[in-house]
Image (spheres, rainbow, N blue to C red):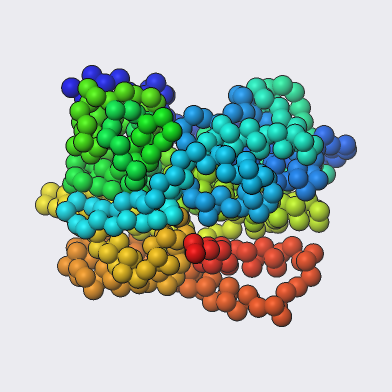
């Protein structure tokens, strides 16, 4: 019986957090960032990065450029056993910034598969190459980065948790569980539960949540391919189940995930785990008795419309999951960090060199991105309504089949960026037109359910996406190159380029 399969060890803590997110805060989170008008004087470092798992990527890039960087990590700075799936294209930035040697770069890529499947319900199936088809060893990656970081003069303070920070006119003082540190800039890479982010959001509940359960297991049929976005059942128990699957070094990784709001009728993680165990045999073609569990996995990933987050203070910058710089369709910030790593390290380098460390200057490093904001409509369309009695539980699968049918017809230049968290104006317009042309009845039924406020908000983001595309084209000319010391103009041009998805490089 599926109910007899023990859930992941972390499930009770995750369930409690999911419950707190549903309920909303009963009191405002405590203030951990303060101000002081006195000057700080000497500083221990140029940058302190709180949170090492993704922070080491940025820390290594800055240390290589000669900045004094201290990285604090509340535990031991070590990658998890579960692989991170990405692509060679996205990993290329680690070579371009010379954070890894070519030999190390190849060594961290421990699994490869040729193509990933996309399919929904009774609709067609498609295969896509070059998307999430590389499994990265986080242990090896962080070990390489940590060693280079130390060689370049960086300092790692493990078993050191962040407690508070005080902003001074000439620096920032950070109180940790192991004492005080001072720097020019504090970078928050502590993730979704960062106390700095909690203070900045002032108790704001997430606008949606992605729930995930899964495992890495042995005993499943050997399959050389993966699943990128797959569904084989209609909506049930108040949610639409989606699946991912990847070959792994020590088995096969499978995830069941779903998008939902905070309504108490949405599933618990326990409910998801039970459904995962119940549906996994049909999904992978193996009896539960044959499966040998290597790791059991779970996750709760909140998403906020007010993202990327700009922290309300000087000398503070949020990156990775702390900033919410990934779209509400993706979960886990590794891909988003890779995409923005070059932009962030260059921007921070110039901010430090030019002393542009006030709130307005740093806000330009986490600008509004309309190509991420437009994806909120897609996510809402994948959340089953709870109040409509006659709603068709197959309609989400049907909608997604139509969307991908249109994108696949438009070619890889449309579907590949979308699957890698990059939405572009032309591709989005082709996909929407393709859906309306192929299934106007489905669109007509969907629009009232989305609601006028949601549609108006989306129209605003779509218009901004078009504006950013225009601005990017107008300013992407050699004659408009300006003084490299013009920090603000360079950040605005980056915002337009990344905000319309023109930073994306299609695989050859």
What residue is at 71 percent from the left and 51 percent from the top? Answer: 348
Q: Is residue 402 above or below residue 69?
A: below
Dividing the image into 4 quarters, which one contains the N terminus? top left
Whether residue 279 is visible: no
**Residue 252, image x, y percentages:** 35, 34
**Residue 471, image x, y percentages:** 58, 75
Q: Is residue 183 above or below residue 452?
A: above
Foreground: 193 or 333?
Answer: 333
Foreground: 494 or 81?
Answer: 81
What residue is at 19 percent from the left and 45 percent from the top? Answer: 233
Q: Is residue 177 left or right of residue 294?
A: right
**Residue 222, image x, y percentages:** 30, 37
Q: Is residue 480 above or below residue 61?
A: below
**Residue 289, image x, y percentages:** 22, 22
What residue is at 27 percent from the left and 25 percent from the top? Answer: 291
Q: Is residue 109 above or below residue 399?
A: above
What residue is at 21 percent from the left and 46 percent from the top? Answer: 232
Foreground: 481 or 407?
Answer: 407
């Amino acid at each position: 019986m599926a109910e007899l399969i023990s859930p992941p060890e972390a499930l009770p803590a995750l369930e409690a957090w999911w419950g707190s997110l549903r309920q909303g805060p009963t009191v405002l989170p405590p203030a951990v960032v303060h101000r002081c008008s006195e000057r700080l004087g000497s500083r221990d470092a140029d940058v302190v990065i709180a949170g090492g798992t993704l922070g080491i990527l940025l820390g290594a890039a800055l240390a290589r450029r000669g900045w004094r960087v201290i990285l604090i990590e509340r535990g031991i700075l070590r990658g998890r056993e579960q692989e991170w799936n990405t692509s060679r294209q996205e990993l290329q930035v680690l070579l371009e910034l010379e954070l890894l040697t070519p030999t190390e770069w190849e060594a961290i890529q421990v699994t490869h598969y040729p193509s990933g499947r996309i399919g929904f319900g009774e609709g067609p199936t498609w295969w896509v190459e070059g998307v999430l088809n590389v499994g990265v060893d986080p242990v090896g990656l962080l070990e390489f980065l940590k060693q280079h970081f130390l060689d370049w003069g960086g300092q790692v303070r493990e078993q050191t948790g962040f407690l508070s920070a005080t902003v001074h006119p000439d620096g920032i003082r950070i109180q940790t569980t192991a004492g005080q540190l001072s720097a020019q800039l504090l970078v928050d890479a502590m993730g979704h539960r960062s106390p700095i982010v909690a203070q900045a959001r002032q108790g704001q509940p997430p606008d949606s949540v992605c729930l995930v359960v899964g495992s890495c297991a042995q005993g499943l049929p050997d399959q050389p391919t993966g699943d990128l976005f797959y569904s084989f059942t209609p909506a049930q128990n108040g949610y639409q189940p989606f699946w991912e699957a990847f070959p792994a070094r020590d088995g096969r990784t499978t995830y069941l995930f779903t998008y939902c709001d905070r309504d108490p009728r949405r599933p618990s993680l326990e409910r998801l785990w039970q459904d995962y165990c119940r549906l996994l045999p049909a999904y992978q073609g193996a009896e539960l008795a044959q499966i040998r569990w290597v790791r059991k996995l779970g996750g709760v990933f909140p998403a906020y419309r007010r993202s990327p987050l700009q922290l309300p203070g000087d000398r503070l910058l949020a990156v990775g999951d702390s900033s919410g710089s990934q779209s509400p369709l993706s979960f886990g910030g590794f891909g988003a960090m890779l995409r923005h790593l070059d932009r962030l390290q260059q921007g921070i380098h110039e901010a430090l060199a030019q002393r542009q460390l006030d709130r307005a200057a740093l806000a330009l490093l986490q600008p509004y991105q309309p190509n991420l904001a437009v994806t909120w409509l897609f996510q809402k369309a994948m959340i089953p309504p709870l109040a409509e009695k006659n709603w068709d539980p197959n309609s989400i699968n049907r909608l997604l089949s139509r969307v991908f049918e249109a994108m696949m017809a438009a070619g890889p230049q449309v579907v590949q960026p979308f699957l890698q968290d990059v939405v572009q104006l032309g591709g989005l317009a082709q996909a929407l037109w393709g859906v309306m042309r192929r299934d106007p009845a489905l669109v007509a039924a969907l629009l009232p359910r989305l609601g006028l406020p949601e549609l108006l908000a989306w129209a605003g983001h779509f218009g901004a996406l078009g504006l950013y595309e225009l601005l990017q084209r107008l300013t992407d000319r050699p004659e408009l190159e300006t003084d490299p010391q013009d920090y603000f103009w360079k950040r605005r041009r980056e915002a337009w380029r990344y905000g319309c998805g023109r930073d994306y490089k299609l695989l050859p």
